[in-house]
Image (tube, rainbow, N blue to C red):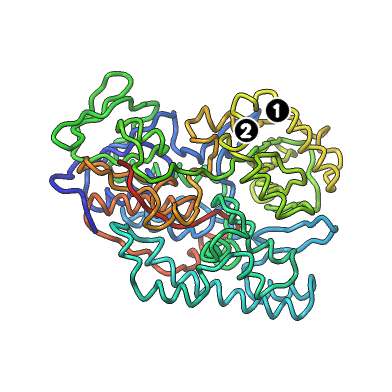
Amino acid sequence: MKAVPGPTDHVVVVGAGLSGLACALHLLGAGRRVTVVEREASPGGRSGRVNLGGYQVDTGPTVLTMPHLADEAFAAVGDSLHARVELMALDPAYRAAFADGSTLDVHTDGEAMEAEVRRFAGPAQAAGYRELRAWLERLYKAQMRRFIDTNFDSPLQLLHPDLARLAALGGFGRLDRRVGRFLSDPRLRRIFTFQALYAGVAPAQALAAYAVIAYMDTVAGVWFPRGGMHALPRAMADAAGDAGADLRWSAEVNALERSAGRVRAVRLATGERIACDAVVLSCELRSAYELLGLSPRRPVRLRHAPSAVVLHAGTDRTWPGLAHHTLSFGAAWDRTFDELTRTGRLMSDPSLLITRPTAHDPALAPPGKHLHYVLAPCPNTEVGPSAATWRDLGPRYRDSLAATLERRGLEGFRDSIQEELLVTPLYWTAQGHAAGSPFSVSHTFAQTGPFRPRNLVRGLDNVVLAGCGTTPGVGVPTVLISGKLAAARVTGHVRRTPPVRPPASAAVSASASAVLAGGAHDPS
């Protein structure tokens, strides 16, 4: 593995999102002096927090899987995730509601899920689920260490027996077709393939290897931190501060001072100069390139994942059919993905993620009130409406979403709203997200593994990238790994991810889920 040459005693980490904070903790654990510089007034990055009239709104991911990856970062400084954050294991992980009126609770316990599938679709599908679960477990084991939790220096690193194992498992076939070998019921297939959307690829085109995301959601367990998802980056920042990190809030970087192929200092918008031996840029990939004065050297330009519209609604009521996470599927499926990724139209029959965090933490809303998060995937601004168009389109689409929810059983939804926040590609663009997408660079084959933008920068010896645009990719688990891999580039030491294990029972109660997929390539 290539590592930063020369001195690395003092490292500046730009950005205090999950990847930047994970990197900082791993660097501190390796004995480095660390300064974290964040343009916002608090940690979190995408996992931010807004107080909306007494409703505590998570502005980013609402689901958490693989919490042991976060615990690994805490452990680097002798700390513990479970000492700082109360996690609650969600059961069901999701409730799936289909257009035909049927519902299915997704359990991560194998026996419970087999019984639920048998009730929902009969014994043959239950047997298929058991086979699918075993395949997902083998797929995860074949991928994690070799293709996800690794720093790629060359595509030749793929030439390993694990590649043959992945091929033998059908990992290079198509996701929808491979899952269809186990489950013939199209509703069940959706449960194990919809995650490909967040990787930016339709299930019919996605590699079957991306089913590792479904492993995380449906096998490894889904969690929710008391206090919401923002409790995780807040706890990570506290742990980093206690371990000696210099945390700078409301501090925007506007230049990097360079000489002889190295960054010598980070300059803030205030004019302050922070001298350093190495820099980790965990900001948006596009922002990192702009700071570096470079562009990715690739044969074709980067493609970005679809975007999303999110309606945060503080309400005076809730609905008994909603679980903590509810997947509300429309009747359309293939057409939906075509609209999102090719034609650029808004979903004509939307599939939605509805999250109700107050189901497990009522303190996130005023007494007797409820908080709902409605996520509707939409085209990014490269293939769909421009960011500016969303200024007028957003309110109309919000009304359309509310009408859809009411048709699907959430009667009186519009009248129940007391506080709301609508997030569209206009907002994501203003935050610096390329193509107006919070899901960054899509996980096409040409943008995955050793072909994803690399976390080393050609021509600059001491700059490392972290975050969802680089190795290994999009999602909470992967950005935590990304921070660890960035730290390894600085220290030269690889800390291997331990096997999945349940959190310490004393700290556990209930929680939520995330997204994954792999990757690396060259930002220069």
Q: For residue 245, what is the image quadrant?
A: top left
Contact, CB < 8 Å: mark 1 with mark 2? yes
Q: Could you say whether the residue bearing mark 2 is in a helix, strand or loop?
A: loop
Q: Residues within 10 Å of mark 2 (few under 14, many from 20)?
A: many
Give the x, y percent position of residue 344.
Answer: 65, 39
Residue 424: which disc?
Answer: 2
Q: Residue furthest front?
A: 299
Considering the image in quadrants, where does the C terminus appear?
top left
Left or right relative to 512: residue 266: left
Q: Residues within 10 Å of mark 1 (few under 14, many from 20)?
A: few
- Residue 9 versus residue 317: which sits nearer the camera? 9
Q: Residue at x 36, y 26 (%)?
A: 251
Residue 63: which disc?
Answer: none
Left or right relative to 362: residue 235: left
Q: Could you say whether the residue bearing mark 1 is in a helix, strand or loop?
A: helix
What whole-number distance in Å separates the C-alpha atoms at marks 1 and 2?
Answer: 9 Å
In the picture of the structure, the residue carrying the numbered disc 1 is: 393
User: What kind of residue is marked 2?
Assistant: Thr
Q: For residue 410, what is the image quadrant?
A: top right
Q: Residue at x 69, y 65 (%)?
A: 189
Q: Residue at x 38, y 46 (%)?
A: 299
Q: How many marks?
A: 2
Give the x, y percent position of residue 503.
Answer: 49, 63
Q: Would you say residue 362 is visible in this rendering?
A: no
- Residue 265 versus residue 325: which sits nearer the camera? 265
Q: Residue at x 55, y 54 (%)?
A: 514
